[in-house]
Structure formats: C-alpha cells, structure tokens
Amino acid sequence: MADEFPLHECVFKGDIRQLSQLLRSHDVTQKDKHGNTPLHLAVMLGHKECVHLLLAHGAPVKVKNAQGWNPLAEAISRGDRQTITSLLRKLKQQSREALEERRPALIKALKDLGDFYLELKWDFHSWVPLVSRILPSDICRIHKKGSSIRLDTTLVDFNDMRWEHGDITFIFNGESKPSNSLTVLDNKLKVFQNIRNEESESEIEDEIDILMSSDIVAAQMPTKNITFTRAQKGFLFREDKTEMVGEFKADFYAVHGMLLDTRKRREHLSDEDLQKNKALMESLSKGTIVENCDKIPKDTEIQRRPSLLPPSTPKVSWEVYINSNESSPPNLGRNQRLKRTSKSFKATLAMSETFPMTVEVLMDVLEVIAPFKHFNKLRDFMLTRLPPGFPVKIEIPVFPTVTAKITFQVFKYDNNIPGHKFRIPRDYHEDPNRFPDL
C-alpha cells in the first residue's frame, strides 16, 4: 500500500529533494486511501517547502479529501498566514484558468442560442422566526443577444448575515478580452466597474482576515438521493396537480430527499471569535440582519490577523498513516472542533413542457451568471436529474436557515433587442472601487 503513493510519502517525511525529482514523472493530483492529495498532507503537516513546490507544479487547491475538506480549509485550521495566502492566490488563479479553458465553448454555445428576454423572481424564506418577513426578494431581468448577456437586479449581495439592495446591471460581452468582458453598473450612482481578473493586495489580505476569524464551513446538498413524485390536489377526488406558472402550463412535483449537510470547524478560533460569531447568529435568529453594512473608513489602520502557533507535531509514522482505517485516519493537524448539522427541506417543483428553453440552454446562460452569489445554487440544482420539461418554479436551500423560491415568469425569443443595452451609457463614469467584493 505504501509503495502506491511515493509523492505522499516524500511529503509526509519532508523529503523535498526526492519530491522534486518525483514531480517530474508522478501525478500531483493523486489521492491516497484517505482522499488526501500530496498538498493536503503538506499543509496539515506544516511542510512549507513542500507546499510551495507542489503549488508550483499545479497541485489543485479546490479538491476535497474523504472528509470533505480542501487544502485551504486545512491551512486555515493550522493558522499559518503565509500558507493561507499562497493557497488562496493559487485557488483564484486555478479558477480563472479553468474558466478560460471553458470560455471558447461557452461563447459558441451563447452564439448558437436565439436572442431572448427572460424574467425570473427570487423569493427568500426562512424557518427561523421573524427572519422571513425581512428577507429580500428580487426580480431578475436577463437579456441575451449574440454572445452578450445583460442581467438587471436589485439584489447586489446576499448571505445569511447581510444583504445589499440597489439598481445594478451586469453586462457580459463575449467578444471582449477576458479582462474587459464583465462589467457591473450602479444605475443610481451612474458609475461602472470592470470586474478584474485579479484582486489587489489589500483585498487578498482582507479575505484572509475573514477566513481566519470565521468558521471553516463545508455545505453540500447531495443530489443522488433527491426524488420526485407528482403533487396531488383535491379532497374527495385526488388528481395530479397542474397549474399555470406565469404564462406556462406546469406539472407540480413534491421533492423528496433534499438535505443540506453543513459541517463547521472552529479549532482555529479564539474565545473572542466564538463570542462574536455567536452574537451574530443570535441577532440573525431575532430577525436583525444587517443591511447595507458600513465600510471601514479608508484612514483606519487595519490590524491584520496574526498566524497561530503551530499544533504539536503528530507522533504518527508514514506506515501507520497509510495503513490506518479509511474511515478514521489519524489526525495530522490541529485537533478538530467539528459541528455537523443536517436539515431536510420540503420543496415543490413545477415542470413545464411548453417552456421554450431547455435546461441545457439555461445551463449555458448560468455558466456566465453563476459567479453572482445565489445563482450558483440554482445551477447546482439544475444538475439534478429532473422530471420531464423545464423547471419554471423551484425551491432550493441557499443557506442552512434560508430557502429560495425561483419562478420563471416571462420568456420570449426576441431578435430585436437593441445593442445599446449591452453598452455602458455615456453619462456613466468609472469607479474601480464601487464593488470591492467583485
């Protein structure tokens, strides 16, 4: 067994010279029996030279081990700021490169689509008392012409702690260079910002501070156990439920097996961090979500989060590690403080055979829009094997306490969409700092 993972063994033993030689001929993405890549082991054991060498040879940062954690999560647990920085930068670089690889096929798919106008409504709800009445709603309007997409929305940013409203437009131009292809407009302030491919030094440092002071969260909604049964209506005489959703006749289904599995690790947090995070969650449960959060004044000196003292070196040999039980590998880093919750969701789904778009076409559109927060949740659900037709009304969990109901209200093909909708108005001026999180 041990001979099957020479890269892992070199990393485990900190043999940087042998690792350098083996990287010329071995797969840096290989997983061992515990699902760990060589990069996982290098991070957990604090072997910084191995980390940098593996990253230089393209070791993937996003890949998860059998416990569901990627190397960045393990780096946050260990608490070395330099390692977190290296992994975060490489993760962003690899994400950009993966998107650029898909870009030609995406542009071709958009060109092959007919031009259209699409209108969908988002309604957010929560099982937490008082929260639902203050959660936002939004109507998104999407225009598609050639290889360009325009998305108009009032919901700028949204998570389970805060949201930001506005009058915002995203414009994607597939014919432009990647660095200029995506622009966001604030229609109230009449300013625009090109979404950059790379973050500034201060933005990276800000993100690291947040990562080091927050729970390490892994949330997933397994789709393989989701099933659908026809919804019924009537009391004495039961029949399948079929109703109009907007302009479209739709068959309704009950969704079963929808489960949001959330795991949180907090071994890297101080008692002060835990108190702050607890206070935030308590305010959420009382329905006091922060809206349009104030930014830190520019002249305020920012205190960066320091590295943690490293955990003690594990007293585990390579042979013991690689031959240990797959379901319970020995701990190589900081002792985990893990909290796991699973919440099942009741949901309904409406499928229309008359909707003029296919799910595959929508997936191409969402490939462009997916980076915009809650849209990637919709795209993930679309990967489920759905009943026949197009999902004109969907309910999906977007956070452990919040579900979203998405309704496709209007769709029409339109070959006369004016080109000016995909251009920046002349009276708008550039503000590169309007959307610091984008």
Image (cartoon, rainbow, N blue to C red):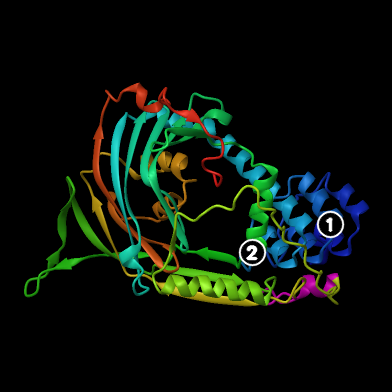
Q: Is residue 160 left or right of residue 325?
A: left
Is 427 in front, or is 85? Answer: 427
Residue at the spot x=69%, y=74% of the render? 270
**Amino acid type of the residue that numbered disc 2 sits on in the rendered structure:** Trp
Is 38 in front, or is 399? Answer: 399
Query: Is 216 located above or below residue 390 in the figure?
Result: below
Provide the secondary structure element on which disc 2 rests.
loop
Image quarter of residue 259? bottom left
Q: CA distance from mark 2 to mark 1?
A: 19 Å
Q: What is the number of callouts on the image?
A: 2
**In this view of the protein, can residue 146 be seen by the observer?**
yes
Q: Is residue 156 left or right of residue 124?
A: right
For the record, the magenta segment spans 318-330
Q: Is residue 335 left or right of residue 98?
A: right
Residue 233 screen position, x and y as percent? 13, 67
Is 16 in front, or is 239? Answer: 16
Residue 249 screen position, x and y as percent? 16, 49
Residue 199 screen position, x and y as percent? 64, 42
Tell me, yes or no, whether the highlighted magenta stretch contains residue 327.
Answer: yes
Image quarter of residue 432? top right
Residue picked out by circle 2: 69
Residue picked out by circle 1: 48
Provide the secondary structure element on which disc 1 rests.
helix
Residue farthest toward the front in the current orientation of the protein: 299
